[in-house]
Image (cartoon, rainbow, N blue to C red):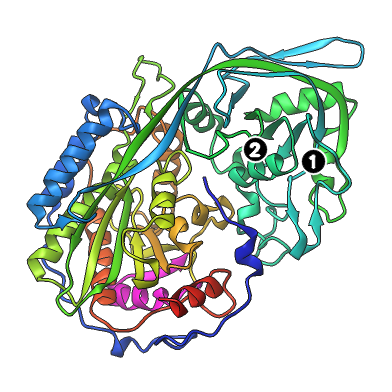
Amino acid sequence: MRFLTLALASALALTSACKQMDDKTVDSAALPQVEVPELSEQTMKDVVKELSLDSYEGRAPGSAGEEKTVAYLIDRFKKAGLEPGNNGSWTQDVPLVEITAKNVSALSIADKSGKAMSFAYGSEFVVGSYRETPKTKIDQSEMIFVGHGIVAPEKGWNDYEGLDVKGKTVVIMVNDPDFDATDLKGDFGGKAMTYYGRWTYKFEEAARQGAAAALIIHDDAPAAYGWNVVNSSWTGTQFLAQSKDAGASQTAANGWIQKDVAREIFEAAGQDLDKQMAAAKKKGFKAVPLGLKASLSFDNDIARKASKNVVGVLKGAKRPEEYVLYTAHWDHLGRCTAAADGDDICNGAVDNATGTAALVALAEGFKKAGAPDRSIVFLAVTAEESGLLGSKYYAENPIYPLSQTVGGVNMDAFSMAGPAKNLTVIGKGKSQLDDYLNAAAKAEGRTPEMEPTPEKGFYYRSDHFSFAKLGVPMVYFEGGDDLVKGGKEAAKAAAEDYEKNRYHAPGDEYDESWDWSGVMADLRLYYRVGRMLAMTDAWPNWNEGDEFRAIRDKSREGK
């Protein structure tokens, strides 16, 4: 979910006067030696079990479940020995807009003769609005296929070239044009997704172009999840950041359609979906008017609310005005599409009660080991599931200046598949924090490896990205895909089972039979990396040529 401005890609490289490590590597022998204290498995269990109770109602922002979550985390942070992290307060208000679509009509697609097709909400399409308006209506809006919906001048790519889509409905492919590549070579990173491939970008660009509505064609592989995830995520209450224009600059309606639905639409337009999608992967693709008109309508229940980030701090002993971040999101989807048994609470036990519990367990560990040289900020953010809104708000309104924030570690959804021989690094090779992680992994007998599925765009799907785009080096890694028991085959089976049966679904519940050994092994790595960062006076940076390097250098120059 997630936001990147083109200014980062085009920023001029600046030379920082600050103390920085060598761009290529860090001598691991020069890094602080870290002893890992006993980290409490019981704490992990207790916090995950508590936060995923039905009484928390899925921890939706602005709900009674949020009130319980925030109160519980404050209590656990206090007991862990932290201090309030926001000028004497444990929380930071995050202004949100809550929009719930009601009375959603079918999606009606009419041809020139007036003959219409009708598609059902939920099973065949989903839709919502980013505008604060009581009713949304798309009436006989001309449809046009715009390929991947990308405008990337630095790559010589413009799917909207020569188009006027004002008032029209654009139909868009998910992911990047070179998604099918077998390596990382290509205009858009080859197999690895760039931000241009994320669905959030597609809607942002459609709004910039003035479209009335945007519909993304869902396809399991390039989307990285099945329709069940889209359905559960897009039906029910949605959260947005409050804006000065109440969303007036956004498209009136944003949504997804099943690929089979898209195929029917293209056939009605006299077009072959597969051929057009293949053509859209090549530079110079020209958008295709479909000669069809789309209509739909729905009501919006709207409320402005202040959700909360929870912030605790452990003050540094020598350089308390320099900060290391640990982040995890406490929120989940609340009530969502019901399972077959009628359960409609998305408890979010793995996603992300586990990461939230890790904040508490790590706080206890840091307190037990004694204050490090630099201050440690433990930040439990809201509304990650709605587009990284809590972390985005903190990054844009930091309690502790980003120029004084050394770097950080993000934790999102621990694996319950057991210990792994390796670990998966999301965005490996982007920053000098890799050297800290390499040293930590070596000490734990683990091997850091690049994510096996870079096409899924995980780098743009969690809270570290909110800080990265403003220059703060952040490391994000997970348990590996080569399990001690069962190897890669067992890891793949476990990941597929979770994605199919529990991810963003009521099935993501606490399980007494879970194997916590892999979680605790990963927690040791998270501790080591943060402790090393907090015990050095160096300022690791993004590697030379990385998109975030220039903005970090500029930030540090003006510290």
Residue 117: horizontal and vertical position, in percent?
77, 13
Residue 293 is labelled as none
State which region is magenta: 429-450
The CA distance from mark 2 to mark 1 is: 20 Å
SS class, disc 1: loop
Q: Where is residue 544, by image quadrant?
A: bottom right
Q: For the residue marked with disc 2, what is the amino acid?
A: Ser
Label 2 or label 1, whichever comes before in sequence order = 1
Magenta segment includes 438: yes
Looking at the rendered image, the quarter that the C terminus falls into is bottom left
- Name the spot of residue 195 as percent of width and height, x first: 60, 54
Of tags 2 and 1, the one toward the viewer is: 2
Relative placement, left or right, of 328 versus 248 is left
Number of marks in the rendered image: 2
Q: Is 111 left or right of 372, judged from the image as shown? A: right
Residue, disc 1: 146
Image quadrant assignment for residue 212: top right
Q: Residue at x 36, y 50 (%)?
A: 412
**Which residue: 44% across, 51% down?**
392
Judging depth in this view, the residue of 182 and 557 nearest the camera is: 557
Q: Nearer the viewer, residue 466 or 530?
A: 466
Residue 249: mark in rendering = 2
